[in-house]
Image: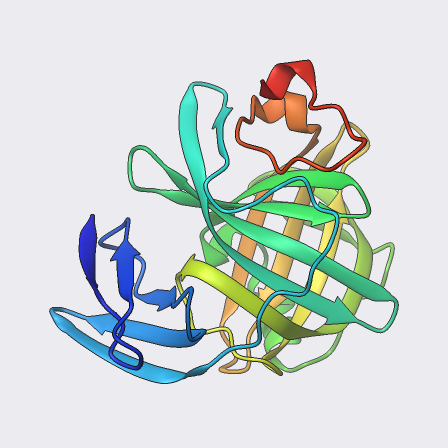
Amino acid sequence: MIETNCPNCGAPIRFGSNDLPVKVCDYCHSSVLRTGGNLQAIGKVAEVPEDVSPLQLGVRGRDGDRRFELVGRVRWRYADGAWNEWLALFDDGSTGWVGESSGRYMMLRQVAENAIASVLVDQVKSGRLIAVGTPITINGIEYIASDAKQVTCVASEGELPFHAPLGLSAVSVDLMTPDGGCASIQKDTDGEVEIYTGRYTALDGLHVTGLRSFEGWPMPAFAA
């Protein structure tokens, strides 16, 4: 853990991981890039709008026998709505993403680019969307493309592996298997393609604690 001060406003900020280079200041919403021992404010990001998500930074949980804490969030928007991607920092220093959309949750972890056929990587890099219904094999498992869309970042917070300013654009392809498996293929504005695989899950399946409380909403027993 690294405790320091925001180079823009001087407020205290904390990096919980040596491997996450970006921290959004809680006070001035500057995106702070850490390179070695140097800090640089690289622009302000939009504050995450109020929503009814039960998740928040600091929520802790467990994926199998691996414990994690939610340390960052990016909110993405597309033509028909928006969703959250929460960065999970595991106790061993690795990371994953908890996707949250319309009350459904996914736990995803990154796999190597060569997990899928190079022709598909080239297709995504070129900006050509993968057609819904296309079968795609990732590490020997066949998925079906369930959605493909252009998306835009509308807000971010916490610690992140990349700078996520307002207006950051990306291509996102969602995939699924009949038995609850899921995957995501994403291309950022620099043309880099990243692939994630995981599964759909409920919050009790992630053994989460520290959820947000809402008036009139009893806290689930598993989160107490």
Which residue is at 64% across, 47% downward?
99
Direction top: furthest residue: 221
Depicted 92 relative to depicted 25: above or below = above
Q: Quadrant of the C terminus?
A: top right
Direction left: furthest residue: 37
Depicted 95 relative to depicted 116: above or below = above
Tell me: 74 left or right of 204: left
List x then y, in percent, for residue 10: 25, 74
Whether residue 159 is visible to the viewer of this picture, yes or no, is yes
List x then y, in percent, for residue 155: 60, 70
Residue nearest the viewer, comparing 53 with 215: 215
Residue nearest the viewer, comparing 121 with 51: 51
Tell me: 111 left or right of 106: left
Whether residue 130 is visible to the viewer of this picture, yes or no, is no
List x then y, in percent, for residue 94: 35, 42
Residue nearest the viewer, comparing 92 with 48: 48
Find residue 18 and report its image quarter. bottom left
Find residue 6 and report its image quarter. bottom left
Residue nearest the viewer, comparing 182 with 208: 208
Which residue is at 68% across, 81% downward?
127
Tell me: 201 left or right of 209: right
Depicted 174 relative to depicted 154: above or below = above
Which residue is at 30% across, 74% downward?
33
